[in-house]
Image (cartoon, rainbow, N blue to C red):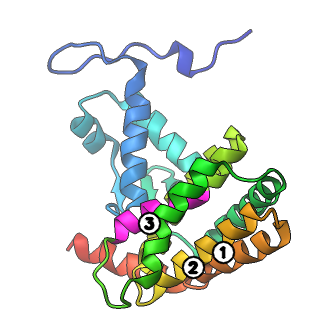
Amino acid sequence: MARSRRSVLPAIRHPKTGVRLGRQIAPQILRTLRERILSWHYPPGRHLGEQTLCEEFATSRIPVREALRALAEQGLVEQVPNQGCYVKQPDVAGIHHLYDHRLALELYVIEHLAAIGPPTDLVARIRAYWEPLLSIRANAPVDGRELVRADEAFHLGFAQALGNPSIVEALADINERLRFVRLVVITTPHRVQTTAGEHLAVLDAVVKQDAEAARRALRQNINHARNKVEIALANALTHAHQRVR
């Protein structure tokens, strides 16, 4: 059987120290660049020069090119012939496609979990975090990133409880790509209270093993964020370009 291209890459050595870096440097570069793109540290249109990245990561062009090729396959960068790679401009239609994918997966999860009932420890964790937020003041200062992590954990927790690793992996990827929407939506006035109520409604329906009610509550929760896509995208673009000025 022919070996994959990755398996025959030569060992990489640090250009200054000569230390063998092994074949894990490309995944490390990929993770770092992906995080920078998805966090809008790199704004759309930014050029990702191979030589600059080689110098930053102290490596050769081979792992850098491998990482950039993977980012292109993920739709995060655009490879322009004879010019290199550029951070891809996000589009509203593409973001809505992600929401379609997310909704389909989560509806499947919630329906099947309602049929068997959720684990008691998951129920306890959700109630302990979200019930106190029902009474938070509309203008209370909030840690947006912490709330986003909690929101992602809420949705991902059901998939993890169902025990399908493929769905968990897909939802985790979608969460990363849609995080900027959540950051805008969840920090608007009254949204924390509303989100808490919606999450608890989903949970109550799953506990009661009412699949239809769980699906309705989940659709309402996800669509609230989905309806703010255009606002979130404009906000993220503005902040990204201000950061690089």
Q: Which residues are magenta?
A: 144-155
Secondary structure mostly seen in magenta is helix
| Point 75% across, 60% down: residue | 110
Neighbourhood count class around disc 2 (C-alpha, 10 Å): few under 14, some 14–19, many 20 upward: some
**Percent x, y for residue 44?**
41, 67
Could you tell me if residue 144 is visible in this image?
A: yes
Q: Secondary structure at mark 2?
A: helix
Relative to the observer, which residue lies in front, 65 or 197?
197
Inspect the magenta stretch and tell me whether residue 174 lies in it: no
State the CA–CA distance, disc 1 to disc 3. 18 Å
| Point 42% across, 31% down: residue | 26
The residue where tag 2 is placed is 197
Question: Residue 148 bears which disc, if any?
Answer: 3
Inspect the magenta stretch and tell me whether residue 146 lies in it: yes
The residue where tag 1 is placed is 201
Tell me: 135 left or right of 99.
Answer: left
